Each structure stands twice: as C-alpha cells, then as structure tokens.
Image (tube, grey):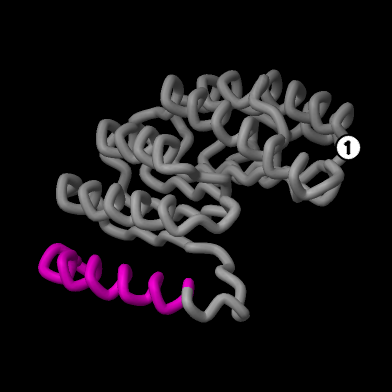
Amino acid sequence: MQSLIKKVGSYVEILELNIFDNNLRKELFDTVINFCEKIKFLDLCIDHINQISKMIFNFNNYLKYLTLEVLDGSIFGRRSEINIHESKICSEILKELSKDLTISLHYLNLRLMFNPNNLYTILEICKQIKIKKLLISSNSPYNLDYLVDNLNIIKNFIKENNNLEFFTYNLGSVGASNLKLIMKVIRILKILLEKLNHLLKW
C-alpha cells in the first residue's frame, strides 16, 4: 500500500484510512504526508494525534471535507480503561484541531467523545472558519448533565452562526431500559427545538 501511495499520491484527492495496526498506520500516515498533496476529502480512524496536524497543514489549500473517528475502544480493554483512553485522545484531537483547521474546510464530521468543554471549543473554531456543514456524533458515557449543557451550547452556536447550512448531533444510545432518562431527554429536546425553530433553515 505504501508503494502504491508513493506512485499515485500526487493524483489522490479522496482518501479514507481505517488501519488498526499501530505501526502500519503510522507508516502509512507518514507516506500520505510525504507523497499526497491535493487531498480534498480525508476520512481517518485514529488513536493518537501526532500526525493529524501535519496532515491538515499539508493539505491546507485543498482540504474541504474532514472526518475523524477514534478507533473502536474494544481493542483497549476494560470499559473504564476505554473511557479514560478515548476521553484523553478526543481531548488531544480537539485541542490540535483548534490550532490547525483550515479556512478552506466547509465540511467537518467528528465521531468523538465530547464533554461540554470539548464541544464548546470545536464549535467556536467552526464559527471562526465559517464551517458550512457540521456533523457531530458523541460517544460519551451517557450523562444527563452533559447532554443538557451540550444542547445549550449547540443552541447558542446555531444562533450565532449565519454560515451554517447543515448540522447534525448524534446523542448516542441512552439505553432502552432507562425510560425515566429517555423521557427527560425528550422533554429537553422538545424545549430546545421550540426555541430553535425560528432559526432553522432546513
């Protein structure tokens, strides 16, 4: 695969990489950074952030569509360890993105673990670069307080962003057995949607 990227890299505009072997992924990412120059669509599955900045900087003038997802946590071990690991990685990714997102970008799809601070950070960056299409899937451990805070942050973001054309926010799985929590979520969503109704253009 590395040999192929070296030969055709200068022509590649769409690239999706989901590599689960750490060493191979690092080598392939380095090859992409060195031999690909005109990536417009980039979809990466990652578990570290060392090369993300280099990639985004390298494709700065071309990159328009970016999707980032953290590797399936099941490969890391116990659930508590998974949550800690994913939370740390996601925080690092969002911190790095806050430095490097390019103004050429108009589509951003993030499948990460979001707490309210992380969500606020990335939405502020999206306002600055005038993102047009934003898709967020939060795989945070379910927390009602987080959800309320996140939805209020989203409400303010939509209010203040005139460039936004499309937005989705995936709440994740609540768990069918927790009916009380599900009803609370529905009530919160109903209230916020009523407040946002006059702002929605879609």
In the image, residue 169 lies in the stretch drawn in magenta:
no
Which quadrant of the figure contains the N terminus?
A: top right
Residue 69 seen anywhere in this rendered image of the structure: yes
Say which element carries label 1: loop
Magenta stretch prevailing secondary structure: helix
Q: Say which residue appears at 40% left-offset and 36% top-offset.
A: 117
Q: In this view, does 4 lie above or below 151?
A: above
Which quadrant of the figure contains the C terminus?
A: bottom left
Horizontally, residue 81 falls left or right of residue 60, namely right
Amino acid of disc 1: Asp
Quadrant assignment, res 87: top right
In the image, residue 184 lies in the stretch drawn in magenta:
yes
Q: Residue 120: x, y in percent?
A: 35, 38
Task: Identify the magenta region.
Answer: 181-202
Write down the residue under mark 1: 21
Residue with the most extreme left position: 198
Depth check: give the residue in front, 7 or 178.
178
Q: Residue 112: x, y in percent?
A: 57, 46
Horizontally, residue 98 falls left or right of residue 187, namely right
Depth check: give the residue in front, 199 or 155.
155
Q: Residue 2: x, y in percent?
A: 85, 30
Q: Say which residue appears at 57% left-offset and 51% top-offset.
A: 140
Depth check: give the residue in front, 114 or 99.
114
Residue 15 seen anywhere in this rendered image of the structure: no
Q: Say which residue appears at 35% left-offset and 58% top-offset.
A: 167
Horizontally, residue 11 falls left or right of residue 77, namely left
How dense is the environment of label 1, judged by Cα within 10 Å: few (below 14), some, or many (20 and up)?
few
Q: Say which residue appears at 81% left-offset and 42% top-offset.
A: 19
Quadrant assignment, res 169: bottom left
Task: Count the numbered circles shown.
Answer: 1
Q: Is residue 135 above or below residue 1?
A: below
Depth check: give the residue in front, 24 or 22.
22
